[in-house]
Image (tube, grey):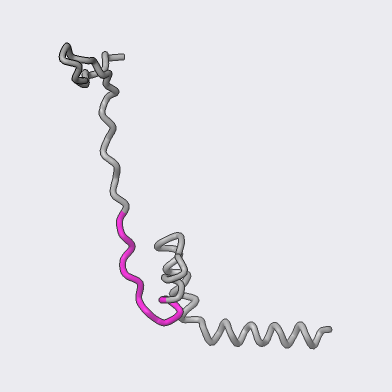
Amino acid sequence: MDEIIRSCYENSLKILTANKVKLIELAQALIARETLDFDELEAIFRGETLPPKPLVMELPKTQPESTVQPKPDGILKPQPAAPR
């Protein structure tokens, strides 16, 4: 049993050592992006550089709530909400 465990450990160590550069790149990409999809993961293991992560745009600040008042002609016209 000890021989099996030792053999598996040595094989794992060889695989990790042989792929150390890719593992470091993977870790850096995960730190920068937090998540990777399958294509990004495959690109890292092919040795490709990932393009910069797109920035998330901020949503515009919300406008105050408004009420909708019908005009005499039946067309709805937004009215600013009353101050709270």
Nearer the observer, 9 or 65: 65
The quarter of the displayed image where residue 40 is located? bottom left
Residue at 79% across / 88% down in the picture? 3
Q: Position of residue 31 (x, y in %)?
A: 44, 63
Q: Quadrant of the C terminus?
A: top left
Instruction: Determine whether, in the image, residue 32 is placed left or right of residue 79.
Output: right
- Name the main secondary structure of what is drawn in magenta: loop
| Residue at image location 47% in from the left, 69% down from the top | 38
Q: Closest to the observer: 44 or 23?
A: 44
Residue nearer the viewer, 57 or 10 = 57
- The image shows residue 35 at horizontal and vertical percentages of 46, 61
Residue 45 located within the stretch drawn in magenta:
yes
Quadrant for the N terminus, please. bottom right
Q: Residue at x 31, y 69 (%)?
A: 51
Does 82 sit left or right of 37 as displayed?
left
The stretch of residues the image draws in magenta is: 43-55
Q: Closer to the camera, 9 or 83? A: 83
For residue 75, which quarter of the picture?
top left
Q: Position of residue 69 (x, y in %)?
A: 23, 15
Q: Residue at x 62, y 84 (%)?
A: 13
Q: Is residue 8 left or right of residue 55?
A: right
Instruction: Work out whether 68 lies above or below 59.
Output: above
Q: Position of residue 37 (x, y in %)?
A: 45, 65
Q: Is residue 84 magenta?
A: no
